[in-house]
Image (spheres, rainbow, N blue to C red):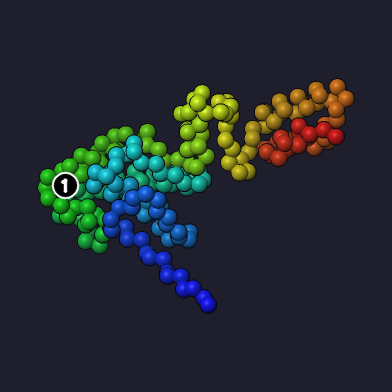
């Protein structure tokens, strides 16, 4: 007997703000960045969270850079719309949603967004690796880690200068009887560094 799995519900950007863990499963180009930027604007404008209470994480540096720009743009757009709610495009559902409040709340939302923009450069919009690095550094001596270590992204290129030092160190070890591999280091290759330390 086959069990029927209900189709996942479409995420409603203007519905109740998510609490706890929410997974948004979506293919490339379906509006994940747009949705995240809009959610940040809602959390801040609706006084659910301040910018320093939000953690916005993406996978790569490129996507994080784009996400940071889009979040900032969205905060600016909403702030400006709150200053002139009558001029809001009725097709822009997010702005319509955020401006449909009384004058006192409009002013409060605009103030919250201005405060968020004032501290935006310090906001945590980062990669998963960058966030993990921040956590390790924040732990200080309570964290069992090498404070000089840097987390590398998969396939991230290592500087030739650093690899050259490792190659020299490997070559020096050959004088004690160990033999370094012929292709000990290929500039720019993480794998090259790993092979540099092997002897046979």
Please indicate whether residue 126 sits to the left or right of residue 193 in the image.
Answer: left
Name the foreground residue: 123 vs 135.
135
Position in image of residue 191 (x %, y %): 71, 40
Element at badge 1? helix
Q: Residue at 67% of width from left, 28% of height from top?
A: 161
Q: Residue at 40% of width from left, 53% of height from top?
A: 22
Name the foreground residue: 133 vs 71.
133
Please indicate whether residue 187 sits to the left or right of residue 147 in the image.
Answer: right
Toward which corner of the image does residue 167 lie, by quadrant?
A: top right
- List the single residue furthest toward the right: 177
Position in image of residue 77 (x %, y %): 27, 48
- Quick one: quadrant of the C terminus? top right
Q: Residue at 45% of width from left, 40% of height from top?
A: 126
Please indicate whether residue 51 sits to the left or right of residue 151 in the image.
Answer: left
Local crowd at mark 1 within 10 Å, few (<14), some, or many (≥20)?
A: many
Name the foreground residue: 69 vs 166.
166
Position in image of residue 143 (x %, y %): 52, 28
Marks counted in the figure total 1
**Is any atom of residue 120 visible in this view?**
no
Please indicate whether residue 57 sits to the left or right of residue 112 in the image.
Answer: right
Q: Is residue 8 above or below residue 52?
A: below
Position in image of residue 68 (x %, y %): 40, 43
Q: Is residue 61 above or below residue 169?
A: below
- List the single residue furthest toward the bottom: 1
- List the single residue furthest toward the left: 103
Q: Residue at 21% of width from left, 57% of height from top?
A: 96
**Is any atom of residue 75 visible in this view?**
yes
Task: Determine which residue is flagged by label 1.
Answer: 106
């Amino acid at each position: 007997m086959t069990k029927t799995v209900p189709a996942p519900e479409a995420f409603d950007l203007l519905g109740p703000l998510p609490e706890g863990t929410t997974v948004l499963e979506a293919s490339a180009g379906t509006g994940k960045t747009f949705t995240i930027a809009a959610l940040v604007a809602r959390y801040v404008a609706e006084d659910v969270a301040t910018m320093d209470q939000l953690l916005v994480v993406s996978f790569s540096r490129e996507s994080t850079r784009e996400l940071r720009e889009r979040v900032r743009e969205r905060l600016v757009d909403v702030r400006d719309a709150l200053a002139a709610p009558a001029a809001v495009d009725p097709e822009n559902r997010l702005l319509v949603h955020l401006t449909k409040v009384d004058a006192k709340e409009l002013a409060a939302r605009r103030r919250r967004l201005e405060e968020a923009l004032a501290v935006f450069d310090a906001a945590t919009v980062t990669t998963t690796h960058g966030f993990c690095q921040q956590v390790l550094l924040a732990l200080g001596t309570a964290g069992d880690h090498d404070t000089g270590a840097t987390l590398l992204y998969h396939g991230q290129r290592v500087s030739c200068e650093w690899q050259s030092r490792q190659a020299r160190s490997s070559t020096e070890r050959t004088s004690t009887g160990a033999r370094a591999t012929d292709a000990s280091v290929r500039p720019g290759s993480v794998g090259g560094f790993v092979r540099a330390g092997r002897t046979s």
